[in-house]
Amino acid sequence: MSAPVKSKSGWHLVKLLELRQQRKLEEAVSLYEQALQRDPRRMNAVNALVAIFKGWRALPDYAARYEAQLAQEGQPAWIHAILAGIYQALDQIEPAIRHNEALLASYPEYADPYFALARYYQRRGDGQAATAAWQHYLALMAQTASDARLEAEASLQRLNLVTIESPAADARVSGQIASIRIIGTAAIENFQYYKIEWGAGEAPTEWNLLVNAPTPVNRGLLATWNTAGLAPGVYTLRLTAVDITGNFPPPYLVRVEVTR
């Protein structure tokens, strides 16, 4: 028995309905864009746009379109907001960070980008940046009770167990001093050991082990760093605390400048 053949009129009706739906979605995209131009903080509009583009299986295409538009129109905040949402959906951390940071440059009192950035920094393994982002988020959301706030508080509490207090970020240290005292905390739950490494530059590709210690430290001396013989320039210290299962929270990074 042969399968029933869809009538020509039925096929045209389906296509007509699809075209109408497409037009409605395109009109919705325009309306959501207009809403974000008025206020880039309208997260519901960003989420709606991302859902439409995802339904069209066109997230990368729209990312490219908005990136081009961004360059042409002088970096408007509303396009950064859309791109931050698109890259979050694509799980592309670095461009998502870039656009959230750009959005905060225009709206520093907007809490949502801090929340997103804190998560991204943790995934990137930058405990210091994650700590700062969580602190900003909690300060802005001090009067709000929510699951997001609970997550922020718990994350910050864990991050505070792996910190370098001295030298401070962007501190200048002398390469003529035999040893620089590194003060901080490495006291995670189920502690096994901590280690401190250093590398040249703001984003080292090679790390040198400074210390590997089996005893937790709470706001005390973690290590001493001999900078004698180092060429002047920027260096990065990395503190990592490892538990008995081999897992570890995001390392804490501090960038310093060695001078002569």
Image (spheres, rainbow, N blue to C red):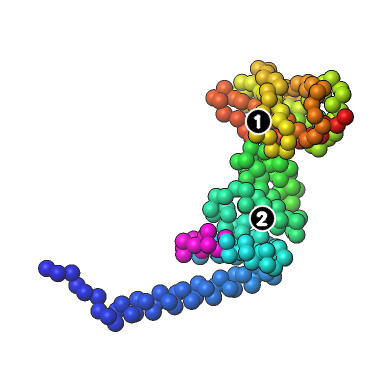
The part of the image, by quadrant, that contains residue 239 is top right
- The disc at residue 240 is none
Q: Residues within 10 Å of mark 1 (few under 14, many from 20)?
A: few
The verdict on residue 46 being magenta is no
- Which quarter of the image is occupied by the C terminus? top right
Q: Is residue 183 above or below residue 27?
A: above
Farthest residue toward the top? 214
User: Which residue type carries mark 2?
Assistant: His
Q: Are marks 1 and 2 in contact (CB under 8 Å)?
A: no
Q: Which residues are magenta?
A: 53-63
Question: Foreground mark, 1 or 2?
Answer: 1
Q: Position of residue 179 (x, y in %)?
A: 82, 21
From the viewer's side, name the closer residue of 23 and 172: 172
Q: Which residue is mark 1?
A: 206
Q: In the rendered structure, which amino acid carries the disc numbered 1?
A: Glu
Q: Residue at x 71, y 63 (%)?
A: 75
Left or right of 181 on screen, residue 43: left
Q: In the rendered image, which residue does mark 2 sit on?
A: 99
Q: How many marks?
A: 2
Task: Determine the residue positioned at 55% across, 50% down.
Answer: 91
Front residue of 25 and 207:
207
Residue shown at the point (59%, 25%) measured from the top left: 243
